[in-house]
Image (cartoon, rainbow, N blue to C red):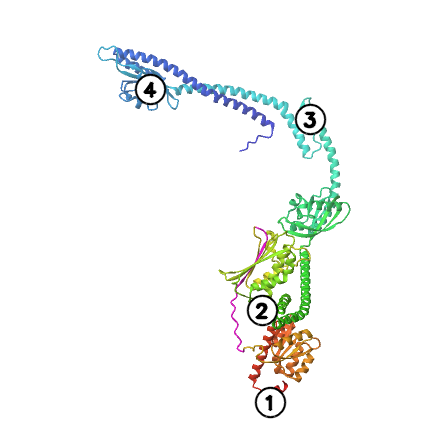
Amino acid sequence: MNLRFPATLKLTVPLILLGFAATLSTVNLLYHVPQAEREAEDDSRKRLAQEMSRLQSTLEYLLLKGDAAAAQHEIAVLAHNHDVVLAALTDENSTVVTATRRAWLGRKITDVLPQFDLTRAGATIHERRAGMSVDSNGNEMLGHAGILLGGDGDALRSSKTGGVFLMYDLKRYKAEARAQVVQQSLYWSGWVTALALAMWLVFHFLLTRRTARLVHAAEELAAGNLAARSDLKGTDELGRLSRAFDAMARKVAETQMRLRRDIAERERVQHALANSEASYRAIFDAAEDAIFVHDIETGAILDVNPKACAVFGYTREEFRGIDVGVLGTGVPPYTQQEARALMARAAAGENPCIEWHGRSKSGELHWHDVSVKRVTIGGQERILAMARDITEKKRAADELSRQREALYQREKLAALGSLLAGVAHELNNPLSVVVARAVLLEEKGDPATRTAALKIRTAAERCARIVRTFLAMARQQPPERGAVAMNDVVSAALDIASYAVRTSNIEVKLDLARDIPPVLADADQLHQVLLNLIINAQQSLQEQSLPRRIRIASRLDARSGAVVVTVADNGPGIPAHIRARVFEPYFTTKPQGIGTGVGLAVSLGIVEAHGGTLTAESPPGGGAVFTMTLPAGAIEPACPDSAQPSRPGDVGCTILIVDDEAEIRDALADILKGARHCVVTAKSGREALERMAAAHFDVILTDIRMPDLDGRALFEAIERRWPGRAGRVVFVTGDTLASSLREFVTASGRPVIEKPFMPSDVRRVVAEAASGAAARDAARSPPVDTIETRMTER
């Protein structure tokens, strides 16, 4: 509860004086009343002690004389004493034998005086000593003492001890003392109050009235009455204060008049500024760009528009308390120092424009096109910064750049594939000659020649495998799944990467399990995955100190029934913060020109398309481990062909070989002549048609790519002129990359011998084609003249 004193000295002063008087009286009462009561109690204690001493000796004398009646009379007389509340005499059993009231006779003293604890009184009585006690309320005081009762017979000494009890009334004495103190307090309070009133009157006439005049003049002046004056007389402090106040009032009046004229002028100017400010604020708040107003000296943010608050997430009050560097990423050149340098350039008269990578309050990053210039706002020089959000624009530009790069990479890969196909085709022809001649030398030469031919064939077959792998990688065709041995895919990938691995001083360790079942997959695609993983491992070891190791392992996971292939290296490994991104398209940590960032993404897509998984790990010991898991395929065994091909030498066939390369024609001719076939050669498609018009051939081997009339045109001409002979055509090619050629070969249904070829494969395919043609001829049951004609043609 808050106490509020009156605001005027007329009431405050007397109230303070009266309060002082009341406090003094209260303190007097609180201090002297208890003291007076204690004095009254002490006085009663003295009188009681005197009375108890007299009564003890008197009663003991009378009782020892045997004058019990006199003793009773002595007790009865005390009933007329106003101070005595109780007087009683007890026998040795504490039973009242004489008392100021008859009702107490024959009762125990403890029943008569229940308000006192008489336990200690019994001990003092037994010892014939005197004692006193006051009840709990402090209203009564009890005195007690032991006395000798009369003896038996003529005995002078009594053996019985009784007690005498005398109780005084303290309440009356205390009330009288209290009343006396109160009377004295009231008397002095009256004098103090009278003195306080006298002091108030003096204070009122000397101070209060004059102060009130001064206060009234001040209030009038504050209310706008410039003519108000106090006009107090005297040489005391109030008089001097009054004259100083009146002088101040005159100056205030003069100043007030000047201020009013100035305020009128300022109001006119302010009204014009307000109109200008309203227009500025409307444009400022409606702007679609974030606008910042900075102090030209400190660079502090003074004001922002609502767009800036919406873009960066701060309120206007928060903007005024932060540095402009907080709105950047904190990475140079988007820090506080760069921002201050930019504003310094604007303060110097430049109008710089930059792209600023900013951070909002929530942590989101945005790109802004920022222009900064020096302006005058409200008559003061400021720095104005305008920021336009270009995040989506830059994102679209980056995406367009990525798409252009991806298109460039695809076009480059397509061009590389076409070039690779041409190179492979050119290599396949001489390789076919080398392989075929080497095999022929093995079959017919002496032991020394066979040994040399074996070495030639082994080297040529390795070259052939590499060329075949290149062609498989360059083919852009739907996957053709079949039974694939993962260990063979690993070996083929190592054949391609062997040169890069060997020249990088990398040790390759193979740990390939032998009991791995085949997987149902496209061998070319899996070869691409393994080659990507090996090349990645080789590139990661380029800057690694020796020793450099790549470990390739394969195994069968019996629990899941999956084939697991791991490619591990002891390189720097993959940092944890980018490990989750290594399979993202176009993400790469390699320098410009080393990689495109699509290898692992493509590999992951291939493995997942086969129902498998591809993961990357960095073990605690360092390096990287890529694990490919593929489900083992249930490959049905191929049904044996009912028509068993003839073994070479069983039946001699007439064979037409069509190829523009003389070496290929000669190699094929030597292979088939060794199998006791009759061979006729043609160096072009037109020459082949001329020979077929003149003679009949059991099998027609033709190259697909030839000048003048190629293999496709030759096949179509045979179908038109001799429909029955189209089933005798076997294509020989070193390039099946073009989709049109693949579609043509597939549509024709004819077998294909890919270069470089093995003599055994050529003999087998020719035997199968001859047997198939013979079976179709037998099924048609041609007439006898046709058979004779065919024999004549032969």
How far apart, in angstroms, are the residues tagged by discs 2 and 4? 126 Å
Question: In the displayed image of the protein, which residue is found farthest to the left?
Answer: 153
Decide whether residue 640 is among the magenta residues: yes
At label 3, the amino acid type is Ser
* Circles 2 and 4 in contact, beta carbons < 8 Å: no
How far is disc 1 from disc 2 in space, using C-alphas?
Answer: 46 Å
Where is residue 220 shown, x and y percent of the image?
67, 32
Residue 289 image position (x, y, % from top left): 69, 52
Q: Which secondary structure, mark 2?
A: loop
- Mark 3 nearby-residue class (10 Å; few <14, some 14–19, many ≥20): many
Report the mark closest to the observer, 4 or 1. 1
Relative to residue 142, is residue 611 depicted above or below?
A: below
Reading the image, the residue beneath label 4 is 121
Magenta part of the chain: 621-643
Q: Which residue is mark 1?
A: 785
Q: Is residue 424 magenta?
A: no
Say whether disc 3 or disc 1 marks the residue closer to the N-terminus: 3
Q: First in sequence: mark 4 or mark 1?
A: 4
Residue tagged by mark 2?
480
